Amino acid sequence: MDLLAAAAGLGLGASLALGLSAQSVSALSAPGGVATALGRITGMLSGYAMVITVLLSARIPPLERTLGQDRLIVWHRRLGPWGLYLVLAHTVLITVGYAGAAKTGLLAEVGQLLWTYPGVLSATAGSGLLLMAGVTSYRRARRRMKYETWWAVHLYTYLGLGLSFVHQVDTGAPFIGHPLARAWWTSLWVGTLAVVLAFRVGLPLWRSVRHDLRIAQVSQVGPRTWSVVLSGRRLDRLPVAGGQFMMWRFLRRGLWWQAHPYSLSAAPRPGRLRITVKELGDHSTALAGLTPGTRVAFEGPYGVFTPDVRRSRYVLLVGAGVGTTPIRALLEELPPDTNTVVILRGSRPEDIAHLDEFTRLLAHHPARLRTLTGPRDEVRLDAAALRALVPDVTRRDVFVCGPDAFTRAFVSAACDAGVSVDCIHHEDFAF
């Protein structure tokens, strides 16, 4: 991780240096020179920001195992807008600078750039695609879109990046007459493409073929909740642990092109994996109709929601609704000497997925089970309630999984109860 962070910093410095190297004192003093120089620098920085943004979501195994996909996606979302801001700044500054040099109006210069400068029209189209992907990635916009629609729109990011890259290396001042600079920038972008293809396409395809996952059984385990058991080959060679999740692609008509994240709901067993899904949308509802023998492709495993991140042998596991499923798998993976308390939350007992399995597991495990059922405003799980349920909560590692609103509220309550932030473990699956 330290080496990767250092490499990212060096790459940023090299990008900035290339942007600065294309300037001269005489050019800066000419009409529009300062705006043009700033436009070239922001263009270099925007290209580098786009590369890092893509790498953060490239599912690189060392990053995934160390940081967790949810944290990488948070960084991806925070950095992504800055790449777009820099693209817009580059566009405006270059136009202003060239208009100053040519002593023409801005609109006239826009026309000149689009129709006479090579690559500018395609780069403008690429910037439009990047802007479209960025706008649809804001939470408010995503809530109004189906996941499948957002995913399809997001694929245009790669086309937009390709158009922008061609424009940079063909007409960018830092690269004209500088073959070493062009070679470095090309290797950076081609290397990023290779990483994406390797870990977003190649590794999932190889694992899917090697392990040959198929639906073994689909059964209802609660109201609108289904358990899906999968069988496969050499699953003992798959580096997966209870608490992790995968991106699943069910190879059936209408579903094969969609990949959705579902956590394991039981610790991996020889030749068997299991997920549990609640009907919350078109995709999850369609899983109830899967038939045995259906092939399954997958990406992953992902996530650091595993016993490996705990700091002590005192653990509190908290699950709400279908969020109890990774908690159930995590419970199986804990060492026998772990002092464990389990809190399960649901509107009704039947809404707590696999409650019967928790009861059976805890009969042979040194753990305490607490179930909280009823309306949220009547059965609270705030700091006071948490301290009453688990008096020694401050000495425990806390693992929590559930709907986003529940998880955020519980994390806040745990902090108010005195639990260290470093001891609270959760993952956001709302990608």
Image (cartoon, rainbow, N blue to C red):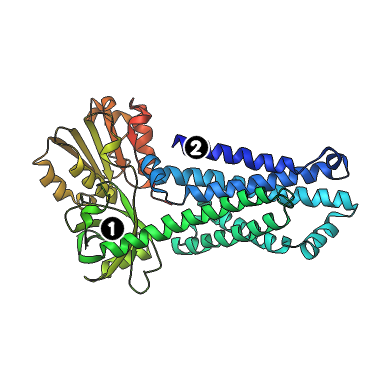
Residue at the extreme right of the image, as rendered: 103
| Rendered image quadrant of residue 251 | bottom left
| Rendered image quadrant of residue 17 | top right
Q: Where is residue 141 drawn, in percent x and y? A: 53, 55
Quarter in which the N terminus is drawn: top left
Q: Which residue: 55% across, 55% down?
A: 190
Say whether disc 2 or disc 1 marks the residue closer to the N-terminus: 2
User: Label 2 vs label 1: CA separation?
Assistant: 37 Å
Q: Please, what is the three-letter code of the amino acid marked with disc 2?
A: Ala
Describe residue 377's horizontal placement relative to residue 21 as left or right: left
Q: Where is residue 395 drawn, in percent x and y? A: 26, 25
**Residue located beneath label 2 in the image:** 5
Q: Where is residue 88 drawn, in percent x and y? A: 69, 50
Q: Which mark is residue 50?
A: none
Residue 373 visible in the displayed image = no
**Residue located beneath label 1 in the image:** 277
